[in-house]
Amino acid sequence: MSTFSTVIRPGILFIEGEFKGKFPFSNSLLIKGKKRTALIDAGTGIRVIQHYKDKIDVVVLTHLHPDHFSLSYLFEGKRVYIPAVESRYRRLEDLALRYVGEKLAPIWLRYVKETMMARDPYFTDTYEEGDVIDLGNVELQPIYTPGHSLGHHVILIGDKILHGADIDLTSFGPWYGHVESNIDKFLDSIKRVMQLDVEIYVSGHKRPVTGREEILSELERFAGKFKETEERILEALREPKSVEELVHMGIIYQKKPYARELLEYWEANMIMKHLDRLVKRGLVRTTTNGKYIAIKDL
Ligand SMILES: [Zn+2]
């Protein structure tokens, strides 16, 4: 098997998902404790996960996005933890309604089943911040970091390694395309993560980052994406534009190569969240025909 994996500390293995762990897959971390072996997230793709499956006693899911939980059903009979705040979402259909609403639900369901091989999330246990999952000689501590989604957690492994999940440090930047996503909460969560004194940062979608300074500068750059996007929106709004016109400019997704309806929906949500903020700050106003126009620069 050619997929990349690397031992980042004795007993701790970084497992890169298919497609280099980029969406619609994600990276996992395997932690071999004295008593139990844990896997954080289960969206690496079937080929990768099959290779490690039998070694795992416990699975911890950072949040209920399908690129992170898609294959949890393969762990039936083992202990699988999800955030308590998401425990009422037991079926893919419930998640489809939560994330994209009735109209797009069939497209979302087809997409996650076909590209991620996702099935209903399987879980046996829930966690919340303050809980500790003990593997023997090492503890996993979830930290609640909402904004990306309602249930998003990062997981501290011991005290020097963090699985940052979708505070993922990718060049794409933060993703906040669902109605429940929240830019201010996302920024607060990034700040909170910056206060953790960790040496190794594991991203859900790119290779691990090592060293305190490097981690801080990557988090800073990642958080800065919100402002860059707002600058681009303001630039576009020198002439009045509707949300739809902004969406077609490709400000967030430069290309929409797959599941176009979903990408357009996510982009529209992200643009609308920025417009709300810009209107509140007096930088943008609405016009009489329902478009938006910039009043002044950032
Ligand atoms: Zn996510």
Image: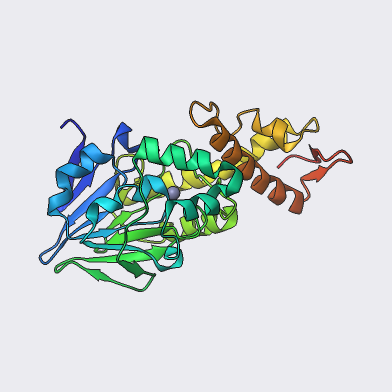
Give percent across and percent down for residue 111.
Answer: 44, 37
| Figure check: 74 above or below 78 | above
Residue at 29%, 66% in the rendered image: 124
- Placement of 67 over or under 254, stated as above or below: below
Regarding residue 200, the answer to whether it shows in the image is no
Q: Residue furthest bottom?
A: 130
Give the left or right position of residue 245, taking residue 252 as reference: right
Residue 245 appears at what percent x and percent y?
Answer: 72, 30
Q: Nearer the viewer, residue 98 or 144?
A: 98
> In this view of the protein, which residue sits in the foreground, 191 or 291?
291
Q: Quadrant of residue 145?
A: bottom left
Going by the image, does 282 lie left or right of 116?
Answer: right
Name, please, the residue furthest toward the left: 34
For the C terminus, which image quadrant? top right
In the image, residue 256 lies at what x, y percent?
53, 28
Residue 233 seen from this side: yes
Residue 292: x and y in percent read: 79, 39
Answer with left or right where residue 51 lies relative to residue 168. Answer: left
